[in-house]
């Protein structure tokens, strides 16, 4: 089994050299105050079902992440459509995607979570005989603590960005959304599109038939999404990851938690950013 510093087909990141900063877009309601068009031409990472909003506005991020195996399965057709249309330079996806579409395994645009996550490599990647990819940005003292938002941030550091700005991360989730029912275990299913969704950028983020997981499947005192971000500064410091992470919206939930320093970054000006 090979152990690589990075995938062989990702040895150079010429696109990163154009800018040292990237904006990671969560899907919380605080993102409503951000004009995504103002980020045109700047590196961005979007995630999960926000593609529905991008379709409506004809704006797409540079990169795409979907690391929840239930979500990636539920939105498989749409993700494949987006890849066929070349909407993103690269995508970081749950290993479940590659289980369902093994023909996509060698697509140079795609990174498999099961290759870079110690937790998922042991659970699934090893069985599928994947090459294990080690990089300090993906090394964690809590390897099982994974969310798309937090690991998209790790991915940004892996790509070589040294200034990472977080927007749209509120980390507060209501569990009593009308039309959302249990689908067994920690899985949920949307029986009909809710008229209002306080968790998301737009009310139709989750639509009839969508499947996803409860936000805090372990029921721990510190919710999973908060825990995944809280461990990140510690891991970067211990592993010597040379990336600086900022909360770019003072009003967002993640900024109020004080996990990262506040710096508006690309939101503060229309000029290209070279943060210092």
Image: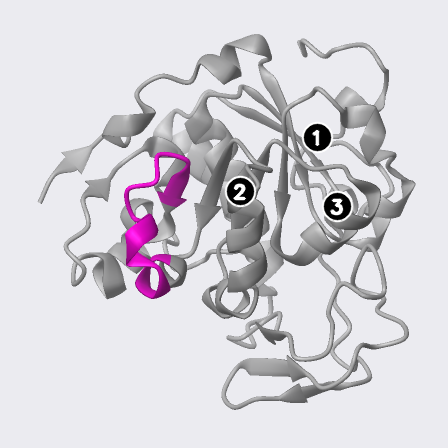
In magenta stretch: residue 161: no
Q: CA distance from mark 3 to mark 1?
A: 28 Å
Q: Secondary structure at mark 3?
A: helix
- Residue found 78% across the figure and 85% down from its top: 179
Q: Is residue 228 visible?
A: no
Q: Which residue is mark 3?
A: 54
Q: Is residue 203 left or right of residue 87?
A: right
Residue 49, x across and y down, in percent: 66, 58
Q: Is residue 213 left or right of residue 97?
A: right
Earlier in the chain: of badge 2 and badge 1, it is 2
Q: Is residue 122 above or below residue 237?
A: below
Residue in front for this viewpoint, 274 or 192 = 192
Of the residues tagged 3 and 1, which is closer to the observer? Answer: 3
Which quadrant of the rendered structure holds the C terminus? top right
Earlier in the chain: of badge 3 and badge 1, it is 3
- Residue found 63% across the figure and 24% down from its top: 43
Other residues around mark 3 within 10 Å, as few (<14) / some (14–19) / many (≥20): some
Q: Which residue is mark 1?
A: 261
- Residue found 81% across the figure and 10% down from its top: 271
- Residue found 61% across the figure and 31% down from its top: 62
Q: Quadrant of residue 171?
A: bottom right
Other residues around mark 2 within 10 Å, as few (<14) / some (14–19) / many (≥20): many
Q: Is residue 178 above or below residue 207?
A: below
In magenta stretch: residue 104: yes
Magenta region: which residues?
98-111
Q: Which residue is mark 2?
A: 152
């Amino acid at each position: 089994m090979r152990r690589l510093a990075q995938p062989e087909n990702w040895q150079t990141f010429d696109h990163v050299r154009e800018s040292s900063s990237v904006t990671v877009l969560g899907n919380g309601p605080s993102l409503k105050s951000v004009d995504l068009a103002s980020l045109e031409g700047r590196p961005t990472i979007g995630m999960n079902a926000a593609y529905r909003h991008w379709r409506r506005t004809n704006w797409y991020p540079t990169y795409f992440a979907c690391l929840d195996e239930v979500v990636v399965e539920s939105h498989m057709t749409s993700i494949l459509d987006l890849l066929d249309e070349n909407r993103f330079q690269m995508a970081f996806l749950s290993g479940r995607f590659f289980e369902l579409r093994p023909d996509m395994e060698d697509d140079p645009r795609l990174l498999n979570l099961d290759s870079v996550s110690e937790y998922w490599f042991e659970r699934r990647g090893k069985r599928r005989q994947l090459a294990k990819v080690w990089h300090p940005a993906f090394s964690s003292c809590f390897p099982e603590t994974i969310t798309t938002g937090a690991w998209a941030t790790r991915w940004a550091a892996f790509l070589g960005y040294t200034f990472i700005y977080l927007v749209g991360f509120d980390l507060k989730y209501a569990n009593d959304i009308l039309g959302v029912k249990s689908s067994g275990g920690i899985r949920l299913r949307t029986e009909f599109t809710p008229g209002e969704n306080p968790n998301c950028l737009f009310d139709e983020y989750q639509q009839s038939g969508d499947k996803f997981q409860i936000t805090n499947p372990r029921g721990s005192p510190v919710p999973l999404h908060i825990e995944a971000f809280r461990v990140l500064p510690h891991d970067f410091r211990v592993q010597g990851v040379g990336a600086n992470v900022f909360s770019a919206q003072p009003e967002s939930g993640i900024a109020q938690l004080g996990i990262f320093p506040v710096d508006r970054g690309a939101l503060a000006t229309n000029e290209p950013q070279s943060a210092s």
